[in-house]
Amino acid sequence: RRPTGGAPKQLSNVSADDFAPGLHSAGRTIALHVWRHGERLIELNSSEGGEILCFATPLRGLYPPWSPDGNAIAFMQLRQVPMIAVVRRESGMQWSSPNVVIQRAAYPVWSPDGSHLAYGAENYVGKVDSAMMLDLATGAPRKFIQPGASAPPLDGIARWSFDGTRIFYKAHDAEGRTSFWSASAHGGAPQLLVRFPNPDRQSNRADFAVDGTRLYFVIED
C-alpha cells in the first residue's frame, strides 16, 4: 500500500504460509520466509505476483533481508545452534550456495553500505547474549552492546539508522515491558528511547521499522 493511501496490493501469491518479507531495492522481487511441507524455506517471488522465481536456499531459513545493492540475501538458519548464512547473485537469477558467515547468531541486518551485518549472538534460539557486528570483508565479529543493568539485550531484530552511525533495538524487562533503545554502531552505552508502562499494550514481535524520526511496530497479545 502506498504511504499516501489507496487500496492495498497483494505482493505474494504462494500456496503456503509466508512471513517476514524483504523487498528488493528495485521493488520487483520479494524474499520470503515460507513454511512449506513442514520445512522453512527462503523463496523469491515477483512483486507483480505469479510463479516463484527461484529458491534462494533449501535450508531451514527465516528473516531474509536483502543487501542494499540487491545482490545478496542474509538469513538465519533455524537449527539447534542458530547460524547466519549469505547467498549471492551470480548471474541473472542464478544464486550461489549458502555461505555460513557466523555461528551462534540470529536476525542479521545489513549496514546501509552492505559492509557489515548486525546480529544477536545466541547460545540457543531465543537466548540473546549480546549484540554483535560482523565485518563481511574480514569475517571478524565484534561486540557493540554488552547486556547489563543499564543495557538490556536486544530482543530479535535490530535496525540501522540511514547514515549507518546508530542501531535501534527492542528489549523486554523481567515484567515483559517493551522498550526501544539506540546505540552507536561503534559501541558505548545504549540510550533508552521509550518504555511502554501499560502491561496490556506491549510489542512482543521481533520485527519493527524506523524511518529516521519514527518507530513503527506491532502491538499484540
Image (cartoon, grey):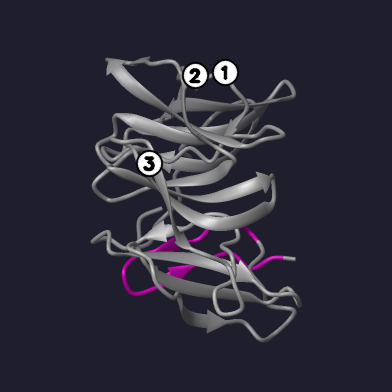
Q: Are marks 3 and 1 in contact (CB under 8 Å)?
A: no
- Residue 55: image tag: 2
Q: Which residues are magenta?
A: 205-220
Identify the secondary structure beneath mark 3: strand
Crowd class of label 3 (few under 14; some 14 to 19; many from 20; radius 10 Å) = few
Mark 2 → mark 1, Cα distance in angstroms: 7 Å
In the image, 212: left or right of 39? left
Tell me what residue is drawn at x 57 percent, y 35 percent: 83
Tell me what residue is drawn at x 44 percent, y 61 percent: 209
Residue for badge 1: 58
Q: Residue 31: where, in percent of width, then height?
A: 45, 33
Identify the secondary structure beneath mark 1: loop
Mark closer to the observer (3, 2): 3
Tell me what residue is drawn at x 74 percent, y 78 percent: 200
Residue type for callout 2: Phe
Residue type for callout 3: Ala
Is 58 located above or below residue 127 in the figure? Answer: above
Mark closer to the observer (2, 1): 1
Identify the secondary structure beneath mark 2: strand
- Residue 140: image tag: 3
Which image quadrant is residue 92 in? top left
